[in-house]
Amino acid sequence: MSVAERVIHIVAAVIRDAAGRSLLVRKHGAAVFQQPGGKRDPGDADELATLARELHEELGCELVRDSARLLCHCSAPAANEPGHVVEAAVYMVEVRGTIVAQAEIAELRWIDPAAPDVPVARLSREHILPLL
């Protein structure tokens, strides 16, 4: 496997509630929580199209596209795919609708970004949460 094949490009969301907590998700079979989002599909027009699709599929909510603000680009070892690195474009976003765990999401958790009370993937723990 080439180095390029070991890089996973994703788009991730930071969704916050009125209390300033941040939403993290845990996929089925995973031990750690991470930002919602996912890999870009060939038919996705851009990063926000990917994010809108992933949020709808995984959380049942709608991305408020005009709310999206690029927070950072970052990378870390992949939480669920040993030997791979995740490179993420991370957006602060607002959503509409009820947020529910569905598809590959086993659990949702609203956390204090300064003091998470669950195990958190390195990408979120080292790069994203410190920015909040």
Image: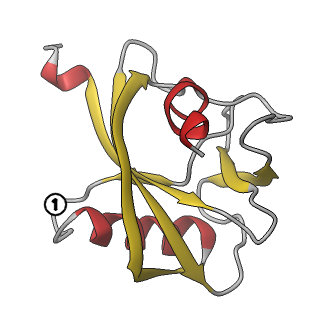
> Residue at point 36% right, 44% down?
72
Q: Is residue 114 left or right of residue 129?
A: right
Residue 50 in sight = yes
Displayed quadrant of residue 119: top right
Q: Does residue 45 lie above or below 79 as drawn?
A: below
> Residue at point 13% right, 14% down?
2
What is the x, y in percent for residue 22? Answer: 69, 54
Q: Does residue 29 lie above or below 54 as drawn?
A: above
What is the x, y in percent for residue 1? Answer: 18, 13
> Residue at point 66% right, 33% down?
30
What is the x, y in percent for residue 40? Answer: 27, 55
What is the x, y in percent for residue 131? Answer: 54, 40
Label 1: which residue? 42
Crowding at dot 1, Cα within 10 Å, few <14 / some 14-19 / many 20+, comes out as few
Q: Three-letter amino acid code at disc 1?
A: Pro
Along the line of sight, the residue nearer the viewer: 6 or 122:
122
> Residue at point 75% right, 37% down?
114
